[in-house]
Structures are given as C-alpha cells and as structure tokens.
Image (cartoon, rainbow, N blue to C red):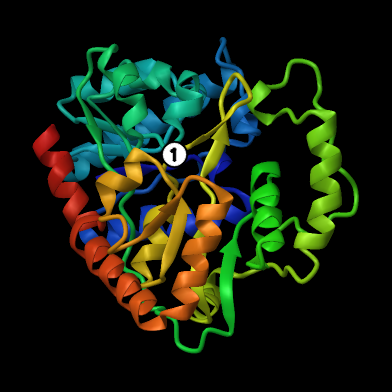
C-alpha cells in the first residue's frame, strides 16, 4: 500500500491524530506500507483555500508523487494507493496514470456533507471513494464511481475506561462557536465540562472574515463577540492536552462529550461523524455525542454510546450517567468492543478490498 496524507491537512494539533490513526494504523495492519518522501505541501495551506485552478506547485508535487508511486510499484507491486486528499492537492492525471498501471486509488474524505466541493475533483477519478457520512452518499453516486460509506478506521488504543471520575463531564477540542454555545448551555443546566484543547486561552475575538474566503470559515460579528465572551468563562480552567496525556484524562471522566457539527456553504451547522466519534468510544469512554445517522449506523444508541439533539437532552443523559456509574462503565466497554471488532484497520481493509 502506498499511503498519502498531505501534511497541509495534518499540521498543528491534528498531526499526532492522523499519524496515529492513519499511517501507524496502516503500518500495524499491513506487511508493507510505503510513505511519501520529501513531498512539500506548504503551497496548499490553508487547505480549504488552496487554488483549484492551474498551479505549477500542484503539478510539480504530482510529478514527484508519480515518480515515487511508480518506483514503489516496480520494487514491490503495489496493491493500492490510499489517500486523504482534497481536489486541490494533486492533479487528476496522477490518479489516472496510477490506475492505468492496474493500481486502484482509494480516496478517503471526512467532510463530505459540508465540503463535497473540496473533494469532487479527485472523487471523479478515484477507483473507490470512502467516506463516513450517509447524507453525502447521493453526491458520490452522482459521479458514477464506486463508493464505500463506512466510519473512520482507528489504530488500536489502550483501555481508558473511567477509573476515578474526577470529572463528571470532559470535553477535548478547540473552541469553535457552536461548541462554546453548547458547553455554555450545559453549564447553565449544572453540567460543567472540564475542557482540554488548544485555543481556549485567547483574549481577542476571532479574526474578521476577509473577502474571498470560504463561507464555511466566516463568523458573523454577533457570533464572534458572543464566542469571545463565553470562551473566557467556559475555558477558564482549560489546558492544552498532549497526545500522550489523552488516555489519562479520558479515564478521569465519567462522561466524555462529542460535539461534531460543521458549517456548510450556507453557514448552517450540521451534525456529521467525526474521527473522535469512533476514537473516543474505542478508549472505553462513556461517550455522549450529537445525534446523526452516521453514529446510528456505527453504534447501538443507548447501549454503546449516547446521543442528543438538544442541550436539555444532553444534560439529562449526563446526570443519569453520574447517578449510575455502573451503567456508564458498561456502556463504555460495550463501545470499545464494537470499535475493536468493526472500526479498526484490519476490519476496514477487508471492506475496502471487497468494495474494489
């Protein structure tokens, strides 16, 4: 397998997560994985705003990747290329030349419900499109290309079931507006979250939108001001969390909260499956996340994970879990069993092979 995750998508706080669950997960599951060498995607940052028009940098990067894919195939006969690529990352001709050698190209994309436009160019030529959001299935079917709607695959993670419940509710993530508002709503209902993640200690409002920027990243004045005010309260005790510290933090929480909305092109928040919706249950946490059909397909709601549609519903589930720690612990263990059985790389690679 030749595996490609451009570093423009994994820089900063996401680097460890993608290294652990994509590259390391594949390496542990397969006898041979080839990774790209000295391929610079600096020109593609920020990824959402990279030009999809003609680009000498994209052409040069695609040629470098082609040389490496062709050399790896000559040396060991590649079974497939698997990537997490936006359309702006590479020339479609790279995918077409690869498949002409008889090497299938599998592209994974995890924001298809609100950013399908960012992947469509590569999705049109990929041998197989893998994505986790059921709401995006029609977009892929319209391309006439094979597709597989299944959750992320995660690497093996340690058991981090709750040991001492130092925190009744924990949250790990950055302070986007919708997350801040949900955490504030829970706090008003007596469910105060212990927050970990980067960006909670900022003292200035988020930067104003600039002309030509993607609407998904633009925040209106009212939301900027409200987020800026609330983040100082919600994030008062927040701390950054290193990857190595994650299991211990999870094990200190009775319930771990997931907030999985993203903003679409109409600037409306929509719930869809994120990597953490698979990763955190895999640790054995009692996990509560926003409801969507993707989570419904991945887990048994109410036995393996909990979901909510309103803040009031979330608060009720948290209070019930605090009152009944045995039930919360069993739910976390049931979720971990499901992840280890169905959502690891060995399981997903079999499904990808059958889909091809």
Looking at the figure, which quarter contains the C terminus?
Answer: top left
Q: Report the residue at 46% width, 71% height from top.
A: 320
Numbered disc 1: secondary structure? loop
Q: Report the residue at 39% width, 59% height from top.
A: 306
Q: Position of residue 22 (x, y in %)?
A: 37, 52
Q: Position of residue 275 (x, y in %)?
A: 43, 51
Looking at the figure, which quarter contains the N terminus?
Answer: top left
Q: Can residue 63 be seen?
A: yes
Residue 150 is left or right of residue 52, and the answer is left
Residue 80 is left or right of residue 115, and the answer is left
Q: Is 331 situated above or below 292?
A: below
Residue 232 is left or right of residue 92, and the answer is right
Q: Report the residue at 87% width, 43% height from top.
A: 205
* The one of 88 and 231 positioned closer to us in this rendering: 231
Q: Can residue 258 be seen?
A: no
Instruction: Report the residue that reaches farthest toward the left.
Output: 354
Q: Quadrant of residue 281?
A: bottom left
Q: Is 76 situated above or below 141?
A: below
Q: Position of residue 71 (x, y in %)?
A: 28, 37
State the residue position of label 1. 272
* The one of 160 and 236 positioned closer to us in this rendering: 236
């Amino acid at each position: 397998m030749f595996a490609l995750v451009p570093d423009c998508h994994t820089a900063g706080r996401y680097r460890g997560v993608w290294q652990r669950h994509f590259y390391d997960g594949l390496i542990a599951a397969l006898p041979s994985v080839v990774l790209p060498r000295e391929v610079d995607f600096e020109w593609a940052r920020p990824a959402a705003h990279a030009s999809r028009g003609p680009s000498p940098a994209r052409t040069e990067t695609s040629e470098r990747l082609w040389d490496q894919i062709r050399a790896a195939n000559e040396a060991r006969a590649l079974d497939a290329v698997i990537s997490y690529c936006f359309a702006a990352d590479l020339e479609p001709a790279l995918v077409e030349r690869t498949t002409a050698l008889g090497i299938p190209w599998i592209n994974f994309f995890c924001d298809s419900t609100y950013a399908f436009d960012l992947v469509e160019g590569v999705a049109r030529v990929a041998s197989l499109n893998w994505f986790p959001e059921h709401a995006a299935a029609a977009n892929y079917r319209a391309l006439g290309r094979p597709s597989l709607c299944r959750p992320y695959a995660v690497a093996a993670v340690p058991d981090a079931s709750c040991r001492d419940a130092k925190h009744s509710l924990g949250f790990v993530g950055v302070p986007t507006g919708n997350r801040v508002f949900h955490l504030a709503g829970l706090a008003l209902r007596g469910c105060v979250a212990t927050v970990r993640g980067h960006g909670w200690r900022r003292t200035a409002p988020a930067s104003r939108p600039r002309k030509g920027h993607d609407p998904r990243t633009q925040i209106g004045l009212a939301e900027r001001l409200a987020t800026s005010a609330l983040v100082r309260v919600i994030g008062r005790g927040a701390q950054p969390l290193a990857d190595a510290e994650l299991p211990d933090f999870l094990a200190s929480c009775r319930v771990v909260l997931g907030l999985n909305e993203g903003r679409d092109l109409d600037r409306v928040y929509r719930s869809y499956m994120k990597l953490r919706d698979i990763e955190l249950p895999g640790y054995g946490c009692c996990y509560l996340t926003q409801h969507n059909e993707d989570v419904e397909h991945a887990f048994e709601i109410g036995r393996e994970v909990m979901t909510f549609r309103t803040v009031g519903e979330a608060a009720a589930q948290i209070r019930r879990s605090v009152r009944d720690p045995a039930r919360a612990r069993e739910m976390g263990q049931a979720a971990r069993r499901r992840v280890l059985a169905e959502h690891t790389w060995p399981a997903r690679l079999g499904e990808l092979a059958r889909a091809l």
